[in-house]
Amino acid sequence: MNLSKICGIAAGVLIAAMPVSLLPCAAAETYSYTLLDDGTASLKCEDAALVHADIPETIDGHTVTALAENCFNGCTQLETVTIPDSVTTIYSYAFQGCSMLETIAIPQAVAKIEDFAFEGCLSLQEITVADGNETYYAENGILFKDGISRTLVRYPQSKTDTSYKTPDKCGTISPWAFTDCRYLEKLEFTKVSAIGADVCMNCTALQKVTICDDVPELIGAGFAYCSSLRSVKLPERLTQIGDRCFFGDAALSEINFPAKLESVGEQAFYACVELKTLPLPKSIKTLGSESFGYSVNESGASTKIPGVVFEVDFGSAAYKYAKSNGFSYRSEAPQSLILIIVVGAVLAILMIAGVSISVKRQKAEKAAEAELLALEQRRKAHEERKRKKKEESGK
């Protein structure tokens, strides 16, 4: 074997031994990529100052099929992006923080978009999906995932409509689906059966929310930091309100608490300073720390909100929470307890009356006995006097 052939084999061995998780783009250092199991590439942008992204269909001979997690994360100047038809997967946080991006077009082949892919896209106004995509579709600029129960994936953060009502065919809402929507004022969930975590967090213009009765739980900080939120209609089937669900909603003053509610998470209504009257049902079994009635003072410490009044059932978890935390409360005893108290009071009165009659009878009996004894003593004295007189006359 000649020397050149040996060198060639050695070079091939060295190249094969090199890690292939991160290889530079041949054309420019704009992108890096990871080779997937099938030999295709998962792309990542390495230029944080990129303004226009024309993603290549191939890189170093490898077909680009995925946008990696955090692909464009931090590209705050990115205004446009073109995704090639070869892409099938968009991973989490792919466009995180792309605050100048206004529109995005999803190609026909994309079959998977992970949660949070478009978080921080504060200027996003419209999402479109290519015709023929079998997994996703767009309706009025809003991204949906098709299926038996259709899922609302992402409502664009800068879509200028002020009200929105979910379509009847939409059964699920993805986590963070409405987060940071800056113009939305009224939102109605119709015929929805599941709502993901943190769904409307930081929707600062949102004023009114209506949730249909089929939703059993609100997970995480679903409506936290909605500083304009005033009115919420909770579903009748709701059993759980998650930790910090309405955290920081300073304007919230109107909300219903369903009769089937069982759990209210930690700081669920923290800093809801306008929520002064709290009619909490007896169905509640657990209340997390500072779930109601607390806010933060100027020094940053938790403090009780003045004027808060709990309307609770005697002995319930809400009653115990209000009492143990030193809040004012109004409580009505259960009918069974009222009956017991009334019956007890009647028995007590009867007992007292009985004791009084018994005492009077005893006093009367003692007085009669004393009178009889006095009469007997007088009779004996009279007999003694007669006896003495008779003896004296006989002498």
Image: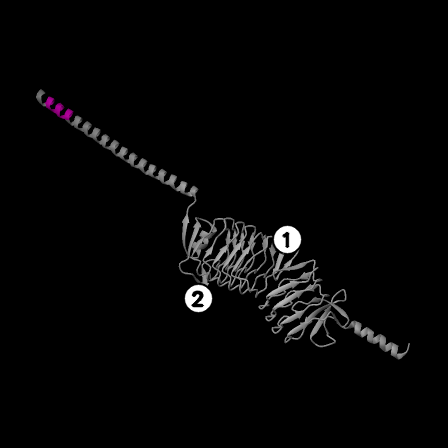
The quarter of the picture where residue 382 lies is top left
| Residue 389 sits inside the magenta stretch | yes
| Foreground label between 2 and 1 | 1
- Whether residue 42 appears in this view of the structure is yes
In terms of depth relative to the viewer, which is nearer, 356 or 129? 129
Question: Which image quadrant: the N terminus?
Answer: bottom right
Secondary structure, mark 1, is: loop
- Taking 146 as reference, is 374 left or right? left
Question: Which image quadrant: the C terminus?
Answer: top left
The quarter of the picture where residue 85 lies is bottom right
Give residue 200's position: percent from left, percent from top.
55, 61
The magenta span reads: 382-391
Q: Amino acid at mark 2?
A: Asn
Give residue 218's position: percent from left, percent from top.
55, 56
| Residue 41 sits inside the magenta stretch | no
Q: Is residue 158 above or below residue 373?
A: below
CA gap between label 2 and label 1 equals: 45 Å
Q: Main secondary structure of the magenta part?
A: helix
In terms of depth relative to the viewer, which is nearer, 38 or 353? 38
Q: Is residue 137 above or below residue 350?
A: below
What numbered label is drawn on residue 347? none
Q: How many marks?
A: 2
Q: Amino acid at mark 1?
A: Ser
Residue holding disc 2: 297
Secondary structure, mark 2, is: loop
- The structure residue drawn at horizontal position 82% and vertical position 73%, both measured from the top left corner, is 13
Give residue 201's position: percent from left, percent from top.
54, 62
Does label 2 or label 1 sit earlier along the sequence?
A: 1
Colouring chosen for the image of the structure: one colour
- Taking 386 as reference, is 295 left or right? right
- Whether residue 395 appears in this view of the structure is no
What numbered label is drawn on residue 149? 1
